[in-house]
């Protein structure tokens, strides 16, 4: 299925995608390292540990903490109270992911009907409102509303993926998807560190994190204005020439060839769900493990995650974009299996960084490859919806994984948790190696990439 845009337009749109998505993801990652201190601030204000609980008014935060304490009490193995904030952060992260699972298919279908540009600008409106609430979040209720609106509005990644598919032909599809993956890697390398630094600058006494939130809001507003003026519509149904529209109205065939299905969308969605179910659980448990084994501080954990992001960004730019999508997915799930095995048995920081290297390979390949595979299986009028459903399945896995994995971690210990995770990823490998097939178009792209070398 050939792209309907010339090389100059494609290059211009790719630039817009890259710049806007980088702004969006950097803004999004500001809050990640702030969660512990941010939630601790709200807890100290609204649900302090001192005093009788009966004397304290019930708030949304105190109610949530009560449920989490009941959850902790269900385990035979005691869970230290220092994990209360981490549990709360995990619960909010799961809520955000599950809200995205609900919204992603809707946003995708709307983009198929009304256009990518319209859907993206509508999504940005919700993002601006979400960050604006965070700027003024002097209580947990307002902060929670910010996260809910953000979860329901965050459609930038899937719409950027749909736009990249609209403007790319089969030969350039994988490399274009890798560009989106590179945005993730770059943002997660620098965004959290910048957010942590901004949190040290106090501007509003009632909200110590207003500076980070304000800069995040500025980036989102700049992104929205940039998209409004720089992004053209890319949905093929809305960008056809007058001759093509007239031919379609007269029942004449257009240049668009029908898609030959190679992999079922159900299998691709299931692989995405299963992979993120185990991967996100392991990802969320990593700070617990590094603290228990090596007494890592937040700074050391930040350096570890920065190392993962740096290696992943290098791989995205130099390796992933040259690989056929299915090869990319197979490489990534295999690396993830090795990481699980290592994390279940390591006893040194060098072993931890070796496992982190395999995690970087996983981060640079799997989701990018699955997005590309899904795009090969979709007609131009259904890409937004199909990619939205793929993302929805992944977000369900990302929402459930941390809760399930850390439950096993606390109940049975690190070794058992990571062994179970390794078995789960091994089953994902079986689906990927023996269930998925290579779309014909991706083979052509691989051959072209080899010629370029």
Image (cartoon, rainbow, N blue to C red):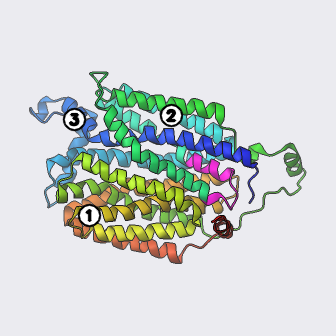
In the rendered image of this protein, does residue 321 appear above or below residue 430? above
Magenta region includes residue 71: no
**Which one is earlier in the sequence, the residue at label 1 or at label 3?**
3
Sequence-wise, which precedes: disc 2 or disc 1? 2
The disc at residue 350 is: 1
Q: Which mark is residue 266?
A: none
Residue 52's image quarter? top left
In the displayed structure, 18 sits above or below 310; it is above
Local packing at callout 1 (Cα closer than 10 Å; few below 14, some 14-19, many 20+) is few
Q: Quadrant of residue 28?
A: top left
Q: Residue at x 49, y 70 (%)?
A: 330
> In terms of secondary structure, what is the magenta stretch mainly?
helix
Helix or strand or loop: what does disc 1 sit on?
A: helix
Tell me the residue that label 2 is attached to: 126
Instruction: Work out how far the residue at label 3 is from the one at label 2, CA to CA, in angstroms.
Output: 27 Å
Is any atom of residue 153 visible in this view?
no
Q: Dots 3 and 2: beta carbons under 8 Å?
A: no
Where is residue 46 shown, x and y percent of the image? Answer: 21, 30
Dot 3 corresponds to which residue?
43
Distance from disc 2 to disc 1, alpha carbons, whole Å, reads 43 Å
Which residue is at a point 36% across and 25% down the rendered structure image? 136
Which circle, 1 or 3, is nearer the viewer? Answer: 1
Residue stretch in magenta: 158-174
Q: Answer with left or right where residue 94 lies relative to residue 451.
A: left
């Amino acid at each position: 299925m050939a792209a309907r845009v010339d090389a100059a337009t494609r290059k211009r749109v790719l630039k817009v995608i890259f710049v806007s998505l980088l702004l969006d993801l950097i803004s999004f990652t500001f809050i990640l390292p702030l969660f512990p201190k941010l939630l601790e601030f709200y807890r100290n204000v609204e649900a302090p540990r001192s005093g009788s609980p009966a004397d304290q008014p019930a708030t949304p935060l105190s109610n949530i903490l009560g449920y989490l304490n009941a959850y902790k009490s269900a385990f035979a193995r005691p869970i230290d109270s220092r994990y209360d904030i981490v549990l709360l952060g995990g619960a909010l992260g799961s809520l955000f992911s599950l809200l995205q699972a609900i919204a992603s298919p809707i946003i995708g279908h709307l983009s198929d009907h009304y256009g990518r540009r319209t859907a993206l600008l509508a999504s940005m409106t919700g993002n601006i409102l979400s960050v604006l609430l965070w700027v003024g979040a002097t209580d947990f209720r307002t902060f929670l509303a910010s996260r809910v609106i953000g979860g329901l509005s965050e459609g930038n990644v899937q719409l950027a993926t749909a736009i990249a598919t609209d403007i790319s032909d089969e030969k350039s599809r994988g490399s274009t998807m890798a560009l989106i993956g590179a945005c993730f890697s770059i943002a997660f390398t620098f965004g959290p560190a910048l957010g942590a630094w901004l949190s040290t600058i106090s501007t509003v006494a009632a909200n110590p994190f207003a500076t980070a939130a304000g800069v995040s809001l500025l980036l989102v507003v700049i992104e929205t204005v940039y998209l409004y003026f720089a992004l053209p519509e890319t949905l093929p149904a809305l960008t056809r020439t007058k001759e093509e529209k007239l031919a379609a109205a007269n029942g004449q065939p257009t240049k668009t060839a029908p898609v030959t299905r190679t992999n079922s969308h159900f299998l691709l969605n299931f692989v995405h769900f299963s992979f993120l179910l185990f991967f996100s659980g392991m990802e969320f448990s990593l700070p617990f493990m590094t603290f228990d084994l090596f007494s890592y501080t937040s700074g050391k954990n930040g350096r570890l995650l920065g190392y993962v992001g740096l290696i992943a960004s290098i791989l995205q730019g130099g390796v992933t974009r040259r690989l056929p999508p299915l090869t990319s997915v197979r490489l990534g799930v295999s690396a993830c299996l090795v990481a699980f095995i290592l994390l279940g048995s390591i006893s040194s920081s060098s072993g931890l960084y070796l496992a982190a290297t395999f995690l970087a390979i996983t981060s640079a390949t799997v989701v990018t490859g699955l997005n590309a595979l899904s795009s090969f299986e979709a007609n131009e009028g259904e890409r937004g919806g199909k990619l939205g459903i793929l993302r929805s399945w992944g977000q369900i896995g990302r929402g459930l994984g941390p809760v399930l994995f850390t439950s096993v971690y606390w109940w049975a210990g690190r070794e058992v948790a990571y062994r179970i995770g390794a078995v789960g990823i091994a089953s994902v490998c079986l689906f990927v190696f023996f269930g998925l097939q290579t779309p014909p178009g991706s083979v052509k792209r691989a051959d072209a990439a080899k010629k370029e070398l």
